[in-house]
Image (cartoon, rainbow, N blue to C red):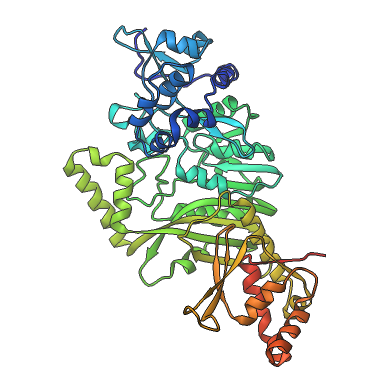
Amino acid sequence: MAGVSTPRLPDPDSAPALRGDLSAADFTADGCLDLLGAVAYAALSRAETVPALRATRGGSPLETLVRLFLLQRSVPYDRARAALPGIERYEAGGWLVRDGGGTDGVRAAVDVRPYAGDGGEDWWIVSDLGCAVGGAGGIGAAEGAAPGVARADLVLGVGGASTTLAGLTVREPVGRALDLGTGSGIQALHASRHATRVTATDLNPRALHFTRLTLALSGAREADLREGSLFEPVGEERYDLIVSNPPFVISPGGRFTYRDGGMAGDDLCRALVQQSAGHLNDGGWCQLLANWQHTEGEDWRDRVASWVPAGCDAWIVQREVQDAAQYAELWLRDGGDHRDDPREYARRYDAWLEEFEQRKVSGVGFGWITLRRSGAEVPSVTAEEWPHPVEQPLGPHIAQWFARQDFLRTHDDAALLAGRFTLAPDVVQEQVGLPGAEDPEHVVLRSARGMRRATKVDTVGAGFAGVCDGTLPAGRIVDAIAQLLGEDPVLLRDRTPESIRLLVGQGFLDPVVP
């Protein structure tokens, strides 16, 4: 059978049978890691296939499936049949195609990538050929990945951004969840475990089909799939959780549907944040990845914080900043432009810098934004830069962070002194000073969990944190420290609540809730 130039998308009806065959061959995240080893497995995430090719020369069913679906190589038909006993069904269903040129081989029509669920489930993410990692310029792009599909319509699979967002998401049981800009359906798949109903939207109709495939192949229930931009497909509906890995790239033109939103500057991310409150139930969450401009004469924190709608608490974290040139180069390479005519590459590069210059953009920040519809008259809005390693999944820590803001908002200084606290798990104390000195120059509290923060405290702060075991009110601990140090207890009580707020807010102390 001759190869087709524009392969049709697979039929979800054959997904359950394919799931059974993939499981039987141990074509799972753990199974592939065991087969390939850490080096080859990590190389795949960098769009490098040679180590994995070397590790799959034996011809076992698992090796055949890795070559077929992960590496997108032609495999002999008899080997494919041994790995997939239902091979005729998968050819008819559009998962596999015969090689052209009369060769007795078969190729995958789509990328099928094993993926581990939150609870250890074996899932599979379906995307366009060559687009599991590395964007449109990733694996196989130079060889014509996803033949017959315009680059603008490509549907990407598992990448660093999607796994980051999955780890950030608060996984509380919810009634309704919305995956806005679903792509290949990774966030919808995660939401299916803890949401009664999942709605997934995308401007690209091909993405909705891939989401259907991902959910069906992973054994998740169907989602309510809707085509359209931003919140248009959902009207006035409200949700308990909104997640989005939107097309946030700030570019001079919307070239690729999956990454360039088509709006000027960072207007797409701003619109998403500003409109989210109107689609959240009370207590509902909106979590998204975003890029934002650093413009002359304006602090990025103030700029992005101004997007937050009334009645919503927000935590905005900037993980990285790139200058205008670095940013342009990153996304030109993502789109494979570096492989084009050098003059065309230079033209696009120049257009990017011209756009930034006109908008007075000196750089672009990468990070995440979490909103919660609290209804507070004075919302808690924090924007901070944190380029350091964090613990993943971070979702439980994010939920705790917002709970701490609720606590601090409802407790004045007197209430804090009357409250009881415990030192958070995994907090250690470090003393910094010259060797042999009687007293340290300063004391640092450091946490190994969540954001893995460290904060400098004085002797009183260190002593206070060290004896917080939930048995005594904070005020009594302060009085005891004042007596021990010979300080005025009234003055110490006056200044200690500020330290308590800092330690609670950053997660070093946990309030004891009656």
Q: Is residue 95 left or right of residue 123?
A: left
Residue drawn 32% across the image and 48% down it: 330
Q: Position of residue 223 (x, y in %)?
A: 62, 32
Q: Position of residue 402 (x, y in %)?
A: 65, 61
Residue drawn 56% across the image and 21% down it: 12
Q: Is residue 157 left or right of residue 330?
A: right
Q: Position of residue 332 (x, y in %)?
A: 29, 45
Residue drawn 59% across the image and 25% down it: 216
Give whichever of 237, 342 is nearer the camera. 342
Query: Does residue 112 sit above or below 272 in this rendering?
Result: above
Q: Is residue 501 left or right of residue 317?
A: right
State which quadrant residue 506 falls in: bottom right
Most extreme residue toward the right, as rendered? 514
Give whichever of 265, 445 is nearer the camera. 445
Tag count: 0
State which quadrant residue 438 falls in: bottom right
Give whichever of 237, 83 is nearer the camera. 83
Instruction: Look at the image and tell me in which quarter the N terminus lies.
Output: top left
Q: Position of residue 72 (x, y in %)?
A: 38, 24
Q: Is residue 306 visible?
A: no
Most extreme residue toward the left, as rendered? 343
Most extreme residue toward the front, as rendered? 436
Give whichever of 19, 263 is nearer the camera. 19
Query: Does residue 495 sit above or below 4 in this rendering?
Result: below
Instruction: Look at the image and tell me in which quarter the C terminus lies.
Output: bottom right
Q: Is residue 427 visible?
A: yes
State which quadrant residue 451 falls in: bottom right
